[in-house]
Every structure is written in structure tokens, then in C-alpha cells.
Image (cartoon, rainbow, N blue to C red):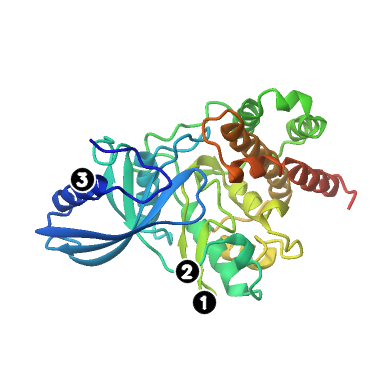
């Protein structure tokens, strides 16, 4: 009997169960599981680095991997790990610089919860550290190019039938979802209530519906010596307007204090936009991107409220989750600043 995954490394029974399962999945003669350790970050998922030695089968040899499973309590709209792995595979097969998915366990019988393993990329992902490096125009350009490749995947792509199609406009879907995520806070907080109304009244014309990462930002990609090595954390992926990912990446709340570097705190918009347009063949709608930046702040505020409630409810006591909830005031300030710019006030 295995114990569900937690923040701690695997128990001896879990290692034994995982080893037996991997041996079968890999068609191997033997598998050695070693050096299991918790990776930092990932408030919504449990991420374990694992070193494998596989003898025989299609993936024989040493393999640096990451095992991803859900956290004890999740967040609305995040994909389960089986579906997340399917999105990752679609992106990888489309040539996006995503980690290669290796094995998926859907039943929860092996470790007490479903999980998947993917190849481990090298480099740094921590946003507050990445933005301290000198600006590398090629990095912003490459991040735009990778997003353009992802947005080439359209509804009807094989293996993604489980992703729900918007039943109304994507704007209505977002506004309704974030209002629901906020719960009573949506009516009690004057800034959030104002933002919901402003977004509804200033909605832009909708663009192409594409496969969107929906958390494409600094902190969710890895960089090694100034070079992009992987796009990670795909749990929010789904069909959306192509401009949503661009607005999310450029929103002030994801610049980690480097406000002058409008492309994720690491570069300028011109380089990021140029890479995107080159790879996608799609022109940037600047007004729509600005609107989606306001939406990005509203969405991040809603996620922060949900994270805080995981702590306050007692479901998952965590200082990190509690502090995330305290960020709503700063997020709201950035959102009002963006609205002011959109209205011509700055």
C-alpha cells in the first residue's frame, strides 16, 4: 500500500513500487531509481527530481527525470497530470522547447496519486533571479518564437480532444471563471469589482483560438547560461485567444521588479514580439495585448485568493500560500496602472 505523494521524497515502499512499474513501462531488464529530491517552486504541483539508470528497452541508459504529481489540494482550472502530460506531448511533438514526456501513470495505484515523468532540463527557472541577469535580446526573441510555435496548434489537433472548447466567447468564459474563483471577494473588493466591470466594457475583438500555455511567464521556463532550455509548468493549458499568452508574459506583475523590461522582466517587447510574429505568421494586436494584461492581473489576483484559501481553510497550511494571498494589494495596484495606461492617462 503506497502513501500519496507529499512534499517529502518518496518512501522506500514508493521507490520499490515506482521501480517495478518503470521496469514494465520501459520494457527494461532493470531500472534503478536514485537521488530523489524535491524541486523548489510549483505551488500547484509536486515536482521530484529523479535519476534513473535503465538497462534495456527504448530509453536505455542514464536518464535525468522529473516526476510531477498533483499537490494535496489543487486550484480551479488546473489540468490533472494525465491531461497535462498529453498537452506536453502535443507541444513537444510540435517542436516547442518543452520537456519530453516519458511515462504516464493514470490510476494512482503506483504512488497513491497519478503522475508522469519527463526528461529534466538544465538551468534556472526562478523568476526573481532570472531578471537580475543582463538583458539578452536573443532570449526574449526565442521566447516569442517558442510561443509562436505553440500557437500553431489549433482546435482539432490529435490527442487534445479532452480540452474543453469555449461555449461562449473566451472573454465571457474568463470573466465568469475569475469571478467564480474570487467568490465573495469579487463583490467586496472595490478594485477587483471595478476591474471586472472595466474588462467587460472594454473587451477587444477576439483573435485566433489556439493552444495556449496560459501561464507563459518568467518563472515557467528554464535558462542555462543565457540560453532557453525548456518551457515548463503546463497545468493551465487550454484553448484561448492567441493574445492572452502575450499579455500574461508582458504583464507588470510578472516582471519581478524589472518594470522597464516589459517582456517578462528579461527583455523588451520589440524582441519578444518579433520572435512571435516570425514563428506564428500572426501580427500582434497591441490593443488586445494591453487589455489581456489587465485580465492577467485580475486572473493572478483570483489565483492568489484561491491559494490563500487553501491555507485559511486548513486544507493545506502553508506560509507560501498565505503570503501569496497578501499579494492581492500589489497586484491590484499594477492592474489599476495598466487600466490608466489603456485609458490614456499614462
Going from N to C along the chain, the mark reached first, 2 or 1, is: 2
Residue located beneath label 1 in the image? 225
Front-most of residues 136 and 111: 111
Instruction: Give the image location of residue 200, x and y in percent.
Output: 73, 31
Q: Is residue 312 left or right of residue 19?
A: right
CA gap, disc 3 to disc 2?
30 Å
Q: Are marks 2 and 1 in contact (CB under 8 Å)?
A: yes
Instruction: Give the image location of residue 139, x and y in percent.
Output: 57, 70
When the figure is inspected, residue 103 is found, relative to residue 261, above or below; the finding is above
The quadrant in which the N terminus is found is top left
CA gap, disc 3 to disc 1?
37 Å
Residue located beneath label 2 in the image? 123
Front-most of residues 309 and 182: 309
* Residue at disc 3, secondary structure: helix
Q: Are marks 3 and 2 in contact (CB under 8 Å)?
A: no
Residue located beneath label 3 in the image? 17
Amino acid at each position: 500500500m503506497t502513501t500519496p505523494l507529499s512534499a517529502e521524497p518518496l518512501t522506500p515502499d514508493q521507490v520499490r513500487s515506482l521501480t517495478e512499474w518503470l521496469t514494465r513501462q520501459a520494457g527494461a531488464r532493470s531500472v534503478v531509481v536514485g537521488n530523489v529530491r524535491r524541486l523548489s517552486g510549483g505551488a500547484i504541483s509536486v515536482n521530484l527530481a529523479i535519476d534513473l539508470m535503465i538497462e534495456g528497452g527504448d530509453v536505455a541508459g542514464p536518464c535525468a527525470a522529473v516526476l510531477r504529481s498533483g499537490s494535496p489540494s489543487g486550484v480551479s482550472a488546473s489540468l490533472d497530470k494525465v491531461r497535462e502530460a498529453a498537452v506536453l506531448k502535443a507541444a513537444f511533438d510540435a517542436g516547442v522547447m518543452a520537456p519530453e514526456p516519458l511515462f504516464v501513470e493514470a490510476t494512482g495505484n503506483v504512488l497513491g496519486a497519478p503522475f508522469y515523468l519527463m526528461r529534466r532540463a538544465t538551468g534556472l527557472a526562478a523568476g526573481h533571479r532570472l531578471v537580475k541577469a543582463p538583458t539578452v535580446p536573443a532570449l526574449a526573441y526565442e521566447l516569442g518564437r517558442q510561443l509562436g510555435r505553440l500557437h500553431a496548434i489549433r482546435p482539432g489537433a490529435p490527442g487534445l480532444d479532452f480540452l474543453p472548447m469555449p461555449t461562449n466567447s473566451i472573454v465571457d468564459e474568463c470573466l465568469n471563471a475569475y469571478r467564480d474563483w474570487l467568490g465573495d471577494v469579487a463583490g467586496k473588493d472595490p478594485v477587483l469589482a471595478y476591474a471586472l466591470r472595466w474588462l467587460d466594457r472594454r473587451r477587444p475583438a477576439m483573435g485566433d483560438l489556439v493552444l495556449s500555455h496560459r501561464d507563459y511567464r518568467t518563472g515557467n521556463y528554464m535558462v542555462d547560461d543565457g540560453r532557453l532550455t525548456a518551457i515548463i509548468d503546463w497545468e493551465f493549458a487550454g484553448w484561448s485567444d492567441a493574445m492572452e499568452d502575450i499579455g500574461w508574459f508582458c504583464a507588470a506583475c510578472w516582471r519581478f521588479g524589472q518594470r522597464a523590461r516589459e517582456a517578462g522582466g528579461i527583455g523588451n517587447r520589440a524582441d519578444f514580439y518579433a520572435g512571435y510574429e516570425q514563428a506564428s505568421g500572426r501580427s500582434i494586436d497591441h490593443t488586445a495585448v494591453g487589455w489581456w494584461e489587465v485580465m492577467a492581473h485580475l486572473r493572478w489576483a483570483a489565483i492568489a485568493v484561491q491559494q490563500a484559501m487553501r491555507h485559511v481553510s486548513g486544507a493545506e497550511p502553508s506560509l507560501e500560500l498565505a503570503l501569496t494571498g497578501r499579494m492581492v494589494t500589489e497586484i491590484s495596484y499594477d492592474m489599476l496602472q495598466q487600466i490608466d495606461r489603456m485609458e490614456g492617462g499614462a
